[in-house]
Image: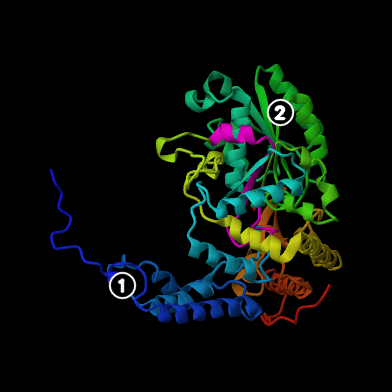
Amino acid sequence: MTVVLRQEPLLSDSSETLDPQNWDEIRAQGHRMLDDMIDYAANIRDRPVWSPIPDEVRARFHDQLPLKPCDLGEVYREFADSILPYATGNVHPGFMGWVHGGGTAVGMLAEMLAAGLNANLGGRDHIPIEVERQIVEWTRAMFGFPKGASGIFVTGTSMANLMAVLVARTAALGQPVRQRGLGNEGARLTAYTSTAAHGCIAKAMDFAGFGSDALRCIETDRHHRIDVTALRGRIAQDRNAGLKPFLVVGSAGTVDIGAIDDLDALSALCREEKLWFHVDGAYGALGILSPVLAPRLAGLENANSIAFDFHKWGQVPYDAGFLMVRDGQQHRDTFSAPAAYLRRETRGLAAGSSWPCDLGPDLSRGFRALKTWFTLKTYGTEKLGAIITRTCALAGYLEARILAEPRLELLAPVQLNIVCFRYRADDPNKVNGDIVIDIQESGIAAPSTTVLGGQLAIRAAIVNHRTDVCDIDALISAVLEFGAQRSGSGDSLVLDVERSPPLAM
Ligand SMILES: Cc1ncc(COP(=O)(O)O)c(C=O)c1O
């Protein structure tokens, strides 16, 4: 059967493409957008950190699928009115919730260039892939990994941790696991991490087919680091029960309070027990750039794999997660899958194997490497390391202010850039939960919460390079004022959203 797609003669018609009819108009519109976004970053302190979303604004995003074209200027106006003012707020120096990087204008410009090139970094022979390989090489040097190590950009550390579990699985069971599945032997594999590890490790065990019960969460010491003696005991107990320990996941910066496991002790234990040693260094691994923090990461250089994000302490705009594997062959053995339509050549566009698609589940991949390359080259690792050191100094300043204030209570030792504390009150979990929401809704700052030993904590993670002493002071004032109101001991709130000018430390 012949399918006739079009009966009239096919004429050349530039209006059939998606390119603009008038390039000057889009250039002018583009310059306006660029100016606005540079102003946004430059004047970010004039804005609230976060704004509650009015119902009518949310309703604008329940619209019908657009069938007809709309003028770009009009669409941009919608962005400016309804999207930009209601973003997460992590560009703002007052954002201290979860673990969010601040991004930079340099990273933003690089993203624009990457989108212009529209490169697909799954594979093939083009310089964008060399840029990614350059970052792999820089990262290898940064962590002291040997030649032959491999690395790949992914969405974030959750994905990088999952991929590391898969590499460890293949290393333990051999490549046939990829065809036959885990089988009886796989069902006996057990992995180990601490109770303070991020939840994505248990998810990774679930997604990899082991089930999260195969992950043993070992208790922590008083510094919130994995108890290595207890870990050793649990490994022995599992071996005695006929199970097959295969993986230990250490944390370089726990999500709740920023504890760094004793990576040296973990690497020695893993060597002795012949276990895969993976480090979840989501934000903490880049502490290697800070001369102050680097000694505390000793042992990281012995890991079999490291997961971390350039979009956290590295300040690269979202997303820019990364997985580094010590033995590149083991990495490729886990993910490479030949296909006729991905045939490799020694010349032409299909040359340059191996390709990034041999190192992960994704085939189509964006050019995350470019914004990272621009960030590393423009600032240099010394400056980025100094920013990391400074965020920890700011956390120390916040700790000192809490210790000097009788109405506040520190809930965990401050070890890195995360501070957990609370306002003293009769019903502290309720009052402190309300305080955090009040502060977020006020636009003054954006801390988040966590629960430590049943106690709800106000949690401030200082990640953003723009955060300054005045932002810490604004957080403290807001906690005290909202706390007084929530616990019924304060006058009506008179909070000034305007901040004092930034101070140098
Ligand atoms: C220690 C730790 N591991 C893993 C993750 C998950 O990283 P991502 O959000 O990039 O997936 C985080 C996120 O904050 C984290 O702090």
Q: Residue tagged by mark 2?
A: 275
In the picture, the quarter occupied by the N terminus is top left
Q: Which of the pair 244/429 is nearer the observer?
A: 244
Give the residue pinned by disc 1.
69
Which dot, 1 or 2, sits closer to the camera?
Answer: 1
Residue 440, quarter of the rendered image: bottom right
Say left or right for 48 vs 459. Answer: left
Circle 2: residue type: Leu
Please check the rendered image and state whether residue 204 is part of the magenta-colored stretch, yes or no: no
Q: Which residues are magenta?
A: 309-335
State yes or no: Cβ of the residue under disc 2 lies below 8 Å from any atom of ligand 1: no
Tell me if 404 is positioned left or right of 195 in this view: right
User: Upstream in the sequence, badge 1 or badge 2?
Assistant: 1
Residue drawn where x is 69% and y is 59% of the image:
314
Viewer-nearest residue: 80 or 196: 80
Q: Residue 147's x, y, as percent? A: 72, 39
Q: Foreground residue, 281 or 127?
A: 127
